[in-house]
Image (cartoon, rainbow, N blue to C red):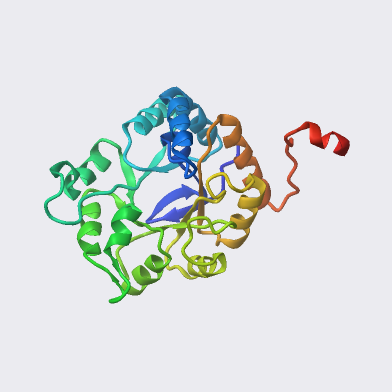
Amino acid sequence: MPEFPRTEVGGISLPRLIVGTNWFLGYSHTSLAKDKFIKQLQTQQEISAVLEIFLVNGIDAVMGPPSDLLEEAIQQVEQRVGRQMIRIITPAFNITPGGDPANEPQVILDRCKEKLHATICMPHQMVTDALLDRRSGEIRELDVYTRMIRERGMIPGLSTHMPETVVIADRMQADVETYIQIYNAAGFLMQVEADWVMRIIQNANKPVMTIKPLAAGRLLPIVGLSFVWSTIRPQDMVTIGTTTPDEAQEVIDISLALLDKRSIDYELQRTRSKQSLE
């Protein structure tokens, strides 16, 4: 089976499609009831079954927060398939004195490397965006955390919900190798219009990992994926979460067709109201 198209981040080869984890870990961006449903559904075995579809298709990178459940599922599928997955971890940690000692940066980053085997470490939006100072045009103390990430043998990046982060980090020549940026055709959770974010991604000095391409389920896969794949650069990536193996295979097939500029032919859902269209 051919490899999914790849790019490079900090000297590491990555697939241009990355496995997202919100639909594994219970972050629906819909309702508390939906979050509970996801958590009840997604056992270690269910998660590993979805990961296997990605891995056998050459998509060997997964992005998510520190999670023992996720790590156990990754290890399970690695043993079954005989191929390693690249972990992209998005940790949160204390950035002011007096917090929980268990959440100190040293403790969290040690866990990312030693327990969760992270290759790329990207402080989560709740860290990054709290450090960003629009007035001074800087991300305060960023070098402290990127140095700690490097010292532990991980590649630093930044996860953000603020489009300014990419612009300011580039201007600072920050020691990061990649960015996470929300990007979808619906503008869901985006702080400025999609065309502005498109321009920011196209001008970024480093590869960008786009997230929420389907606006947390608000867009059909063909709609959301057509938009992002057609407007990002060859070095950029799309991160997508799926709930089942069938969903995983569907987004892979659609993505490959879009990247190859082929006609997209997949089985459509059928309802009674569409019988006259057959």
Query: Is residue 81 visible to us here?
Result: no
Height in image: 183 above or below 99?
below
Q: How many marks?
A: 0
At horizontal 39% and vertical 43% (from top left) the residue drawn is 64
Image position of 253 (left or right of 65):
right
Q: Quadrant of the N terminus?
A: top right
* Residue 171 placement (x, y as % from top left): 35, 74
* Residue 212 placement (x, y as % from top left): 51, 50
Res 86 quadrant in image: top left
At horizontal 24% and vertical 52% (from top left) the residue drawn is 149
The outermost residue toward the bottom is 136
Image position of 43 (left or right of 219):
left
- Closest to the observer, 240 or 176: 240
- Closest to the observer, 257 or 94: 94
Query: Is residue 170 visible to us here?
Result: yes
At horizontal 80% and vertical 35% (from top left) the residue drawn is 273
Q: Quadrant of the C terminus?
A: top right
At horizontal 47% and vertical 40% (from top left) the residue drawn is 31
* Residue 152 placement (x, y as % from top left): 22, 48
- Closest to the observer, 265 or 91: 91
Height in image: 137 above or below 3?
below
Height in image: 115 above or below 81?
below
Image position of 137 (left or right of 34):
left
* Residue 75 placement (x, y as % from top left): 37, 29
